[in-house]
Image: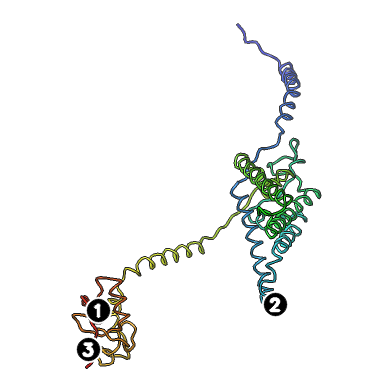
Amino acid sequence: MGTEIIPRAPLKDAWLTEYNRLQPLWRTVQESSRVFLPISISRVNQFDAARLDVEMSAMLKEQLVKVFTLIKPGLLFQYEPELDAFLEFLIWRFSIWVDKPTPGNALMNLRYRDERHVPVSGNEVRTGLEGPGLSVYQKIWYCLGTVGGQYLWSRFQGFSAFRRWGDSEQRPLARHAWVMLQHVEGLYKAASFLNLLLFLYGGRYRSIIERLLKARLVYESPNMNRSVSFEYMNRQLVWNEFSEMLLLLLPVLNSALVKKFFSPFSKGKSNGTADDEAECPICHSLPSIPFVALPCQHRYCYYCIKTRSEASRSYRCARCNEAVKAIQRQRSS
């Protein structure tokens, strides 16, 4: 039997026909796969960014308070809510309002993104970090919710506490306002706790304001080189452990033994002189009420030897290191 030979032209036409038939199906698969890439932003980075912003505000506040310290002490104490709101407004004005990250977000490579206008399909999606920043309305509402809301709440709480709305002898209107204030505070804390649970589960919005405005923190750059120096941290840990070791060992050391060990290296005074014998070896002054330690007969101040012997039953003489059995007032010669 001979081998059947298939012509090349019909085979090529068959491949082209099959390719043209599968091309619409392949395009459909590609279109359906062009969905928004799910990304996971580190929750620790977001919390660290918020903490860094708080520390930055505290540093600015400390420096501003030092400026007015010499003018009038306590001048800014009564205007503390206004000062906090002013510093928060400055941080918002030079960061979020001009489409820049806050100091904490910049250190953690984070930025705010408007989740309402995130591309969910198309060729513009590459890393999942694409998306526009906050709109003007979102920025304004963010300022009103964070800066203005915190200021009004702190002032209202201070005013109600100063007026003593919670006292039982207050008018019914003040009492109702105080109860309503407590209810609002409780509801806000419950909502914040619920938002925290949702944030720990999904990692999207760390505060209620961000959830309401659909302002999500995403990475500003897909690639970031982090060079962290642990030199200062290691030095701090070493000194901390060294200080704790000294605090543990110093009460155990016998001061009399240490003085006796270093006494041969002391200069300016010779051991066993009449002046040294006359002085109290504890306070190094002439005893006003001289007492002697038994059985070594060395002179002490009454209060010095009494406090040492009462504090430790196994107290030893500071001169000869002999155990002090009792004390006796020195007889006048």
Q: Which residue is mark 3?
A: 331
Q: Earlier in the sequence, mark 2 or mark 1?
A: 2
On screen, residue 178 above or below 83: above
Q: Position of residue 253 (x, y in %)?
A: 31, 71
Identify the secondary structure beneath mark 2.
Answer: loop
* Residue marked by disc 2: 71
Residue 247 at what x, y percent from top left? 39, 67
**In the image, which is nearer the foreground, mark 3 or mark 1?**
3
Q: SS at mark 1? A: loop
Please tell me whether mark 2 or mark 3 is closer to you in this view: 3
| Relative height, residue 198 to residue 275 (above, below) | above
What's the distance in space between the residues labelled 2 and 3, CA to CA?
63 Å
- Callout 1, which amino acid? Cys
Quick one: quadrant of the N terminus? top right
Q: Are marks 2 and 3 in contact (CB under 8 Å)?
A: no
Q: Residue furthest front?
A: 169
Task: Inspect the image, locate mark 2, and give the three-letter code of the amino acid beneath it.
Answer: Ile
